[in-house]
């Protein structure tokens, strides 16, 4: 029998009109990996029957969760940003178009499907009622520029046909770590080594309902938390002083291949936590400062603004 391989598998994403109802149209998302799956609790009862044999276990609630690791580009990544942050505001009368995604807008529910078409009988694992729960990325090293999206959902159905027989191939225009420029407090800095950031949408995964068959009836939104870490060469105490004084600052990461292939990630308001450097050996010393992003009065009216520029209007 033919064994399925990851190289020939696909992840197809669709935007749902009704929560939990499979989307009409699908888009093939380039991925490095996806651990999305359904699991279900199996509980051993404490029932006593007069002998020492265990009684039949019973099934509990089911959950759908996992992580999708995605290479960052300026074409397909638009769909992941829409999945996480909602519909952007698009500007530009012609290419390049700038798509501005903000935290705080209405976020869609998703249909996600793992397609294993190299099996003797192709199988399609369909997940509905999905929401992006977290996003994390690291920027600045010489590795592949990727983002990891945490996902939670309601149900899994294994079928022999896809929800969209002809999903859209999105194309791909990779962005890279060596294209990164970084602004701190509005000014370009050249001594940063790494920037990590994590976004948690704090979705509620406890909404199981009576008569719902042990799957979530809703996945409400929570209040976001945005945290990160800036690692820089220890050349002076400027950043440390901001942490010590609890001075508000900002971070802006720009990855640019061209005017039509670019992404800018802006945290307009951040504060650093104090974390002084030590002497760990004879080599160069770095300072590593955790930060938290928030929104109080930034002109962007958001704690997170991601602007993606590409040749597509997405009308």
Image (cartoon, rainbow, N blue to C red):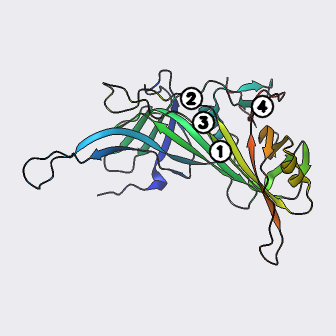
Residue 196 appears anywhere in the view:
yes
Characterize the local packing of mark 3: few (<14), some (14-19) or many (20 or more) Cα atoms within 10 angstroms: many
Question: Disc number at residue 172?
Answer: 1
Q: Secondary structure at mark 2?
A: loop
The location of residue 179, given as percent across then percent down, is 80, 52
Characterize the local packing of mark 4: few (<14), some (14-19) or many (20 or more) Cα atoms within 10 angstroms: many
Q: Is residue 244 left or right of residue 38?
A: right
The location of residue 93, given as percent across then percent down, is 80, 23
Q: CA distance from mark 2 to mark 1?
A: 30 Å
Q: Secondary structure at mark 3?
A: loop
Residue 112 vertical position relative to residue 119 in the rendered view, above or below: above
Marks 4, 3: nearer the viewer:
3
Using the rendered view, name the quadrant where residue 62 is placed.
top left
Marks 2, 1: nearer the viewer:
2
Task: Name the residue rendered at 54%, 34% in the picture.
Answer: 203
Q: Secondary structure at mark 1?
A: loop
Mark 3 lies on residue = 201
Q: Earlier in the sequence, mark 1 or mark 3?
A: 1
Q: CA distance from mark 4 to mark 3?
A: 24 Å
């Amino acid at each position: 029998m033919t064994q399925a391989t990851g190289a020939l598998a696909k992840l197809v994403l669709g935007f749902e009109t009704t929560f939990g109802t499979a989307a009409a149209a699908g888009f093939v998302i380039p991925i490095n990996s996806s651990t999305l799956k359904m699991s279900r609790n199996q509980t051993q009862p404490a029932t006593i029957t007069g002998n020492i044999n265990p009684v039949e276990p019973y099934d509990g609630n089911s959950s759908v969760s996992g992580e999708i690791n995605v290479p960052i580009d300026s074409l397909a990544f638009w769909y992941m940003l829409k999945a996480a942050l909602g519909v952007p505001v698009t500007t530009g009368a012609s290419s390049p178009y700038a798509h501005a995604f903000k935290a705080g807008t209405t976020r869609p529910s998703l249909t996600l499907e793992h397609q294993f078409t190299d099996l003797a009988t192709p199988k399609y694992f369909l997940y509905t009622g999905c929401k992006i729960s977290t996003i994390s990325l690291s920027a600045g090293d010489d590795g592949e520029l990727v983002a990891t999206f945490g996902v939670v959902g309601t149900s899994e159905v294994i079928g022999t046909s896809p929800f969209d027989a002809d999903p859209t191939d999105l194309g791909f225009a990779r962005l890279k770590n060596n294209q990164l420029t970084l602004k701190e407090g509005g000014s370009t800095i050249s001594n940063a080594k790494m920037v990590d950031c994590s976004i948690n949408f704090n979705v509620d995964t406890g909404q199981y309902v009576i008569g719902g068959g042990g799957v979530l009836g809703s996945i409400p939104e929570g209040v976001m938390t945005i945290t990160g870490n800036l690692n820089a060469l220890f050349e002076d105490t400027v950043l440390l002083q901001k942490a010590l004084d609890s001075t508000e600052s900002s971070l802006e990461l720009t990855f640019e291949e061209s005017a039509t292939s670019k992404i800018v990630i802006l945290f307009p308001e951040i504060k650093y936590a104090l974390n002084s450097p030590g002497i760990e050996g004879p080599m160069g010393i770095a300072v590593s400062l955790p930060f938290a992003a928030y929104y109080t009065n930034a002109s962007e009216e958001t704690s997170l603004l991601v602007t993606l520029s590409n040749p597509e209007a997405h009308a």
